[in-house]
Image (spheres, helix red, strand yellow):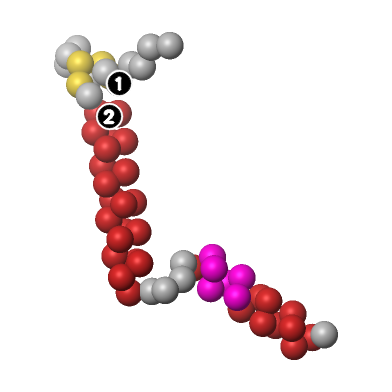
Amino acid sequence: MTWKFRVRTEKGGTGCTRLYILLGFTASVALLATIWSRFFQRGPLEWLMGRATGVARRIQ
């Protein structure tokens, strides 16, 4: 299996744009997760599920 990260540009050269996009996306997600964990105890999906189970408890 060969990984090809080089992409042909309009001028005929090659560039590593896909690799840069992958690394940029990975870094931004890691940064957002770090910032989120400092300000909030739970993630947004955990908060939503907690609200949904609270409503279900009141119905019973």
Above or below, comparing residue 31 to residue 16 in the picture: below
Mark carried by residue 5: 1
Q: Position of residue 34 (x, y in %)?
A: 30, 61
Q: Which residue is mark 2?
A: 19
Residue lying at 30% horizontally and 21% vertically, measured from the top left: 5
Above or below, comparing residue 58 to residue 3 in the picture: below
Which residue type does callout 1 highlight? Phe
The reply to whether callout 2 and callout 1 are in contact (CB within 8 Å) is yes
Q: Nearer the viewer, residue 41 or 32?
A: 41
Q: Is residue 35 magenta?
A: no
Specify the principal SS of the magenta part. helix
Q: Which residues are magenta?
A: 45-50
Above or below, comparing residue 51 to residue 24 in the picture: below
Q: Position of residue 3 (x, y in %)?
A: 36, 17
Which residue type does callout 2 highlight? Leu
Q: How many marks?
A: 2
Q: Residue furthest bottom?
A: 58
Q: Residues within 10 Å of mark 1 (few under 14, many from 20)?
A: few
**Mark 2 residue element:** helix
Res. 10 visible in picture:
no
Q: Residues within 10 Å of mark 2 (few under 14, many from 20)?
A: some
Residue lying at 27% horizontally and 38% vertically, measured from the top left: 23
Pick the quarter of the image with the C terminus.
bottom right
Q: Earlier in the sequence, mark 2 or mark 1?
A: 1
Q: Position of residue 24 (x, y in %)?
A: 26, 42
